[in-house]
Amino acid sequence: MSAVTYIGLGSNLGDSLQILTEAVHKIAALGPVKVSKLYQSPPMGPQDQPNYLNAAVQLVTDLAPLALLDELQRFEQESGRVRLRRWGERTLDLDLLMYGQEQIQNERLTVPHIGVMERDFVLIPLLDLDAELQLKGQLLKDLPILKHPSLDVLDAGNWAKI
């Protein structure tokens, strides 16, 4: 049975545009995708690091949640992911944000992702994919954090070339 999933993408090390584009192509090998606009946002953690490029992907997949997580983590490793410090620089960060309507909490995975409703760099790309998206009965487009976004659109077109 297929599930509509949402994946957050971020990068601020290396050729971030190329890294994110390659990640989208790898995700697209798992099933049909839709891709958000491409954004730039200030880092959430330590401020002595480059700005991030952020986007989101909607993926329709038959993979179970943990199997999808395994694939996303493999893609991160293939991109040379390094995690130097908490909320620090990343070559590639792929977060499984939502998996259908499922609520999952175990040692490896929390879905919906814990930070979805507090992070504009996650919410705005998600709303590109589905303006009526809801989480826990709340319309995401109505969240107060969206009134003062901290990110800029870099590419509203077909940046991922899907």
Image: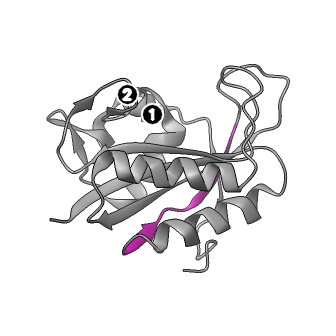
* 118 shown above or below 16: above
Residue 152 shows in this picture: no
Chief secondary structure of the magenta span? strand
Across and down, in percent, residue 55 comes to 55, 54
Across and down, in percent, residue 58 comes to 38, 61
Residues at marks 1 and 2, CA–CA distance in whole angstroms: 6 Å
* Label ID, residue 78: none
* 18 shown above or below 100: below
Mark 2 crowdedness (10 Å alpha carbons): few <14, some 14-19, many ≥20: few
Secondary structure under badge 1? helix
* 26 shown above or below 42: below
Image quadrant in which the N terminus is located: bottom left
Across and down, in percent, residue 35 comes to 48, 66
Across and down, in percent, residue 15 comes to 83, 58
Q: Does the magenta stretch include residue 119?
A: no
- Mark 1 residue type: Lys
Q: Is residue 33 magenta?
A: yes
In the image, 102 versus 108, the foreground residue is 108
Secondary structure under badge 2? helix
What residue do we see at 38% from left, 26% from top? 114
Disc 1 + disc 2, Cβ < 8 Å = yes
Mark 1 crowdedness (10 Å alpha carbons): few <14, some 14-19, many ≥20: few
In the image, 79 versus 144, the foreground residue is 79
Task: Using the rendered view, name the quadrant where residue 93 is placed.
Answer: top right
Residue 52 shows in this picture: yes
* Label ID, residue 147: 1
Residue 30 is left or right of residue 136, and the answer is: right
| Number of marks in picture | 2
What residue do we see at 30% from left, 47% from top? 65
* Label ID, residue 144: 2
Q: Give the range drawn in magenta.
A: 32-41
